[in-house]
Amino acid sequence: MKKIFLILILTTASLFVKAQQINRFNPDTIRTIVIDSLVDIRSHKLNAQDFIDAVLADTGFYQAFQNMKKFGFTAENRIFTYDNKNKVNGRIYRKILHSDAAGKHKIEYVAKKDSGDVYKKNGKYQLYTVEMFDFIFMNAYNSDFTKGDALPGSGGKNESYKSKLKTLIFTPGRKVSGIPFISSKTEIFGSDMRQYYYYEFARGKYLDTIPVYRFKVRCKPSTSDSDTMIKEMTTIFDERTFQILGRYIDMKFSNMFFDFNVQMNIELNNFDGEPLPTKITYQGNWNIPFHKEERASFLIVHKDYKRE
């Protein structure tokens, strides 16, 4: 029972953690956008519920990762781990060519460099955070994104803890059962949680040319930390199509069992008519009793997409 509980904590906390004001990478989608103005969405014949419905109904953001199996591309991964004084103690760099040969996905390492305290004696990563991130974004050991088209969270009661993590990333705003102490706090648009949040709207340009809406959900200043887990969620919509092009999530939670705090960002762009991930950034730390505190940051860039 204790082992199962520990796995639950680790798989929940391993991604959703934020560094204590460490200048590693700036993962905020908003920095990729030039904001023109705040917007009165009524003049655009929209309301807050339109944006909420679009977030909850969206399948395209996850599908963008599935779309990668149609393309060859280059992935560059930079991973840093830190000691308790926020000094780098491990580095991982990968440059990987993804392609398909005779219908089979192929991974070729162009560059592979590790240094510092990265691996255990058995060859596995020192940090569970790195292992989980590796699984979710499938750039090191495997190409899990090429397998199947099912949305995360669709596996019923027997879905894995890793699938729960995917649900939190790709389909936020829904209740995710089976995560100790915080399952109900993920349902930020539900009747019990809406009271804690402000909604903000703006217009701008994404990547200098794409007109977008920015829909920001953020905690009210008076909200207690224990009432919420998601402190901010910013979603970027293509103004012309309402397609989601970016998502930034800031999460924080602390109690006697665990303490985590995360900033994470995923950005998409269109290639040959398909939305595809171009940048994933993360920075964070998490801590549970009787386990080594983990601190890490990631920068993953996908480029040179070519339809196979």
Image (spheres, rainbow, N blue to C red):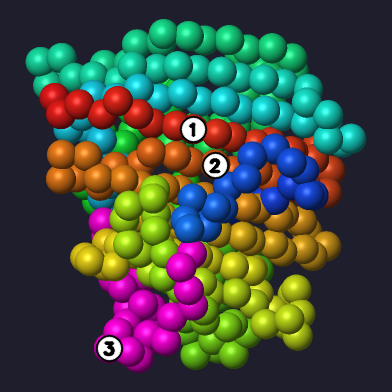
Question: Seen from this angle, which residue lies furthest left?
Answer: 102
Marks 2 and 3 sit apart, C-alpha to C-alpha, by 34 Å
Residue 117 visible in the shown view: yes
Q: Tell me if 166 is positioned left or right of 226 in this view.
A: left
Q: Which residue is mark 2?
A: 281
Q: Residue at x 60, y 74 (%)?
A: 218
- Name the amino acid, label 1: Ile
Residue 58 visible in the shown view: no
Q: Nearer the viewer, mark 2 or mark 3?
A: 3
Q: Residue at x 52, y 10 (%)?
A: 112
Q: Which residue is mark 3?
A: 45
- Badge 2 density bin: few <14, some 14–19, many ≥20, Cα 10 Å: many
- Name the amino acid, label 3: Lys
- Name the amino acid, label 2: Thr
Q: Tell me if 89 is positioned left or right of 147 in this view.
A: right
Query: Which tag, 1 or 3, sits closer to the chain's start?
Result: 3
Marks 1 and 2 sit apart, C-alpha to C-alpha, by 6 Å
Question: Seen from this angle, which residue lies furthest right?
Answer: 85
Residue 5 magenta:
no
The residue lying toward the viewer, choosing from 31 and 18, is: 31
Q: Tell me if 239 is positioned left or right of 139 in this view.
A: left
Q: Quadrant of residue 128?
A: top right
Marks 1 and 3 sit apart, C-alpha to C-alpha, by 37 Å
Q: Nearer the viewer, mark 1 or mark 3?
A: 3
Residue 44 magenta:
yes
- Badge 3 density bin: few <14, some 14–19, many ≥20, Cα 10 Å: few
The residue lying toward the viewer, choosing from 58 and 206, is: 206
Q: Which residues are magenta?
A: 35-60
Q: Which residue is mark 1?
A: 300
Quadrant occupied by the C terminus = top left
